Amino acid sequence: MYAIPFLDIPPLRSAGGTVTLPGSKSISNRVLLLAALSDGETTLHDLLDSDDTRVMLTALQTLGCQVTRLGPQQVKVQGLGGRLPVRQAQLFLGNAGTAMRPLTAALALLASTHGGVFELSGIPRMHERPIGDLVDALRQLGCPIACLGREGYPPLRVGHGAPVPLQLQAPIRVRGDVSSQFLTALLLALPLVAQQDVTIEVVGELISKPYIEITLALLARFGVAVIRDGWQRFTIPAGSRYRSPGGVHVEGDASSASYFIALGAIAPASPGHDGITIQGVGLASMQGDIRFVDAARAMGADITGSANQLHIRRGHWPLKAIDLDCNHIPDAAMTLAVMALYAQGTTTLRNIASWRVKETDRIAAMACELRKLGATVEEAHDAIRITPPTHWHAARIHTYDDHRVAMCFSLAAFNPAGQPVRIEDPKCVAKTFPDYFETLFGVCQAAPADIPVICIDGPTASGKGTLATAVAERLGYHVLDSGVLYRLVGLAAERQGIPTDAASLTQPAVAERLGQLAATLPVRFDAGRVWLDGEDVSDAVRTESAGMAASRVSALPPVRQALLDLQRRFRALPGLVADGRDMGTVIFPDAALKVFLTASAEQRANRRHKQLISKGIPARIEDLLADLKARDARDMSRQDAPLKPAEDALPLDNSAQSIEESVQQVLAWWQARRPDWAH
Ligand SMILES: Nc1ncnc2c1ncn2[C@@H]1O[C@H](COP(=O)(O)OP(=O)(O)OP(=O)(O)O)[C@@H](O)[C@H]1O
Ligand SMILES: Nc1ccn([C@@H]2O[C@H](COP(=O)(O)O)[C@@H](O)[C@H]2O)c(=O)n1
């Protein structure tokens, strides 16, 4: 996940490959609650691991439910059988509507029947999201509920300690035209008290009906068969009781699929690929957002699929504008708004009033951000009209702590003007799809020249590696420590008995062997460690003797030639910070920013000394000073790719600077070279 203030997505050109989706948020949080309320033990497979499911899991554990994590996407839940071992708890539910609503209903009923008092709260935005219709319905039943802030909004206190009688004879009336989650919450909770038939009557036109279908299907999996009369009356039969089905597999998230369906519809196929394949969700999905497929087809996407898989190719291009009632796909419809940027004509998305009370006011948010890209947007209280830009702008997309805003606007990076897109607060995708951007970059291609590279060259111990790592971390970029590759060649030579002393290296045969060795280096970089032929050599390559050997072998043209392509392959989305001696002069001559980092030899020897001593490696400053001067001299005087500043490099002497000061300087230079995001 990109836990950084912003993520710059370079212009994207094509896409192709397979993505496996994380589990559905709606299904995950429903089955977690159902498993907790059931008799027996349930193993949940392919569960979504995200902010929203984490708050649900934590809440269930706080309530005394035993949850065992079997893997990142697999948990075993020991059902409570409709009883609560804990009678008093404070639950923090973040911004997870799928946790807040059903837990409110379930705890209100359990506190009323068994006694207890529970407080449910969330982040400030959760306290702006209405829950009054559910509170009213539960109060009709006799449940004590207090709104602790504004009436009709969380935080809430349910129960007041002692049991209270529930009035279950009359139908329970609940509004269905603001959020279907209120009806879902009642449907999930009422089987806990169904000693008699319990009926719910929906007031007003029920929105988002597909989500109710998910709820009913999952209730059936857990042994409760609700009797439905159209979309107005739902009866939970007397004697209903949750029973664990043993195991449940969670489908991939159909709303998350929408970004990759749109990607397949927008992006030309990458060479060697035939569109995008999505695994984990297919045409037989129980999730309503699977009907996004119909909407995307209407816009021109070529989509085929099976029960558990979808395949998308670019079909009609440009996309076709549509006029669509999106009531049945409220979440995925946001993706249509971004697809509309690539359509011929004006797209209208109607019946989306529920957008106003989601993670943010999504109609206002989408309108504002689409306009930044150059689109013409008209807003109504329950609709949005989008006309594509005639001139695209590089835009800084504000994401409103709304995962869907962040995800759908990433697709704007395919704009024909080749403008980059900045996504602010990219970590907000953690709500449903923590690895969204990594997954996106895994199937997208950019022109190599469009993938930004920052080069940091300079003499040994000037702080290149430290600076490169810190800058890359702030920008979410990859890092190439090119010195490690030469160190690995020296180490591999030693392991294979190839001499690397100065005299041997003058022999053409030795130089050739070392070149071959470099070309076939069995190296693997994994989670910050370096592996050579299956051995973790992360510490061995950092010794001073490995540095000296590297300096000697790096002067050989066959070695340098052999490592050329390997280094260039590090240029990957979303960008790269490369440190070494010839990054700016030879490897990435087109880099957008080149820095030549220096510090006095004494200062560098001092830093290296401190570095070694702190690792418990004995060293003498005089020896280090002599070694680094020898290394500098050799690196600067060799014929092939000598150490020198590129003509367009910016000099940075950090002798008197702290690490953070150098980082800030480089970031400032970088920002100055970025587009004007002001639109
Ligand atoms: N601006 C700075 N001020 C103080 N210490 C620094 C500064 N920059 C780096 N250092 C320290 O200097 C030491 C050497 O830095 P680093 O390993 O990044 O250098 P390098 O140029 O990558 O070296 P090499 O080329 O040998 O790999 C580290 O301990 C690092 O923390
Ligand atoms: N681009 C590069 C990087 C390094 N070298 C040589 O490798 C030696 C070790 O590098 P470190 O940065 O890890 O210290 C270095 O002294 C150079 O001789 C290189 O030639 N080109």
Image (cartoon, helix red, strand yellow):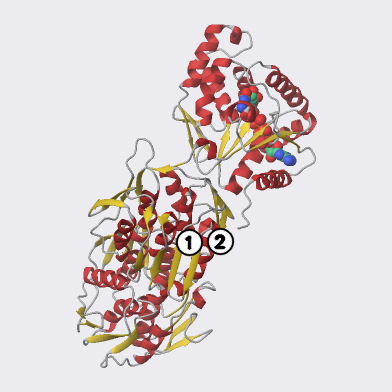
Which quadrant would residue 643 be assigned to in this image?
Answer: top right
In the rendering, which numbered label is found on residue 398? 2
Q: Hey, what amino acid is under mark 1?
A: Val
**Most foreground residue, 226 or 436:** 436
Please, is residue 22 above or below residue 596 in the view? below
Q: Quadrant of ligand 2?
A: top right
Instruction: Identify the element where label 2 is drawn.
Output: loop
Mark 2 touching mark 1, by CB under 8 A? yes
**Most foreground residue, 232 or 136:** 232
| Label 2 packing within 10 angstroms: few (<14), some (14-19), many (20+) | many
Q: Is residue 554 left or right of residue 654?
A: left
Q: Is residue 435 visible?
A: no
**Count of labels shown?**
2
Pick the quarter of the image with the C terminus.
bottom right
Q: Hey, what amino acid is under mark 2?
A: His
The spot of residue 291 in percent (x, y) is 29, 62
Please, is residue 423 above or below residue 577 in the view? below
Please, is residue 195 above or below residue 335 in the view? below
Q: Is residue 235 left or right of residue 454?
A: left
**Most foreground residue, 512 or 589:** 589
Question: In the rendered image, which residue does mark 1 sit on?
Answer: 405
Q: Which residue occupies 41% across, 74% down?
A: 354
Q: Is residue 582 visible?
A: yes
The spot of residue 559 in percent (x, y) is 55, 18
Label located before the other in sequence (2 or 1): 2
Please, is residue 231 above or below residue 551 in the view? below
Instruction: Identify the element where label 1 is drawn.
Output: helix
Q: Which residue occupies 49% across, 71% down?
A: 361
**Most foreground residue, 541 or 480:** 480
